[in-house]
Image (cartoon, grey):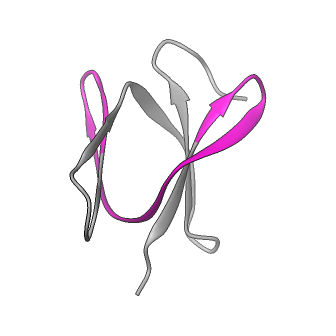
Amino acid sequence: MCQARVYLQKDGQNELIAEEVIFLEERDDGVQLSTFFSEPQFVSARVHQVDFLKHTVVLVPEGEHGH
């Protein structure tokens, strides 16, 4: 199985906000994350980086630009 860990970049640090994410949907106002056993989670952010080898996604808060 290839679930991902999702981080939110804040003040130059990556904060883990979700584990075992199986589906990510980018929307106009943010990102919806889904796992097997939890309700979908909505984050007001946008995708900054995806690392397929490490199974990680880094989001940045909506309106901020990642480095």
| Quadrant including the N terminus | bottom left
Instruction: Locate residue 41 relative to residue 5 in the image: left or right.
Output: left
Prevailing secondary structure class for the magenta stretch in the rendered image: strand
The residue located at (26%, 71%) in the rendering is 36
Q: Is residue 10 left or right of residue 44?
A: right
In this picture, is 1 found above or below 34?
below
Task: List x then y, in percent, for residue 8.
Answer: 57, 37
* Picture residue at 78% right of the left edge, 29% below the top: 12
14 relative to 25 in the view: left or right? right
Which quadrant holds residue 35? Answer: bottom left
As drawn, the residue found furthest toward the top would be: 63
46 w.r.t. 40: above or below: above
Residue positioned most to the right: 12
Which picture quadrant has residue 45? top left
Stretch of the chain drawn in magenta? 8-32
Q: Is residue 37 above or below residue 2?
A: above
